[in-house]
Image (cartoon, rainbow, N blue to C red):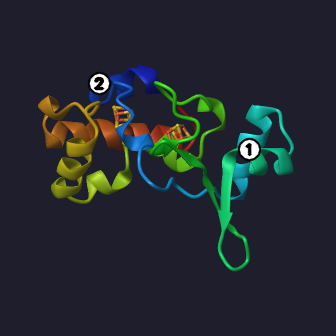
Amino acid sequence: MSVADEIAKIFQCTRCGFCCHGETTVSLDAEDQQRMCTALGLSRDQTAEKYWRVSGAAQNIVQMKVVHGHCIFFNEGCTVHQGRPWRCAQWPLHDSILDDENNFMIIAESCPGINKDIGYEKFCEILKGILAKQHKVKC
Ligand code: SF4
Ligand code: SF4
């Protein structure tokens, strides 16, 4: 069974946009920045001017701009899917779910795409398999 099929058993994004809303976004590391520039077909300077909020004393905190309370790339879904930051790609199948059922409940509360009905133990069993495969395969 493919990783995508395994993921579909425990998570199907409803594109509700909850994870893309807020007054700040996740931070982009160096690989995220490069991936996003490549996906957009823009230079680093062009991408930064149009899409990033750069802050910090050393100007080393790079986040996406927020427009009308959501990430600039959100428009009924992510419009920079191939170039999204790794933290966005990881959400909501975070490995902290495996540590504590409370983490599972908190994430499931904010993400309607999580299949809560499958039960915590089964969810973790499938998630462990997905995370193991994702060390080689990126979804
Ligand atoms: S909160 Fe979950 S279901 Fe909603 S857009 Fe984000 S990942 Fe998809
Ligand atoms: S990059 Fe895409 S997935 Fe990440 S917050 Fe912005 S719109 Fe959402």
Tell me how far mark 1 sits from mark 2, CA to CA.
37 Å
* Disc 2, SS: helix
* Disc 1, SS: helix
Task: From the viewer's side, name the closer residue of 51 and 3.
Answer: 51
Whether residue 22 is situated above or below residue 136 in the rendered picture: below
**What's the amino acid at mark 2?**
Lys
Task: From the viewer's side, name the closer residue of 57 and 102.
Answer: 57
Residue 102 at x, y = what percent? 17, 56
Q: Tag count in the figure?
A: 2
- Residue that badge 2 annotates: 9
Residue 43 at x, y = what percent? 87, 44
Whether residue 101 is situated above or below residue 47 in the rendered picture: below
Crowdedness near tag 2: few (<14), some (14–19) or many (≥20) residues, C-alpha within 10 Å: some
**What's the amino acid at mark 1?**
Lys
Give the quarter the ligand 1 occupies: top left
Give left or right: position of 77 versus 94: right
* Outermost residue, front side: 68
Image quadrant for the N terminus? top left
Residue 68 at x, y = what percent? 48, 42
Mark 1 near ligand 2 (CB under 8 Å)? no
Earlier residue among tags 1 and 2: 2
Q: Residue at x 69, y 80 (%)?
A: 57
- Residue that badge 1 annotates: 50
Task: From the viewer's side, name the closer residue of 90 and 53.
Answer: 53
Specify the quadrant of the image occupied by residue 3: top left
Whether residue 15 is situated above or below residue 111 in the rendered picture: above
Q: Residue at x 59, y 46 (%)?
A: 85
Give left or right: position of 45 versus 108: right
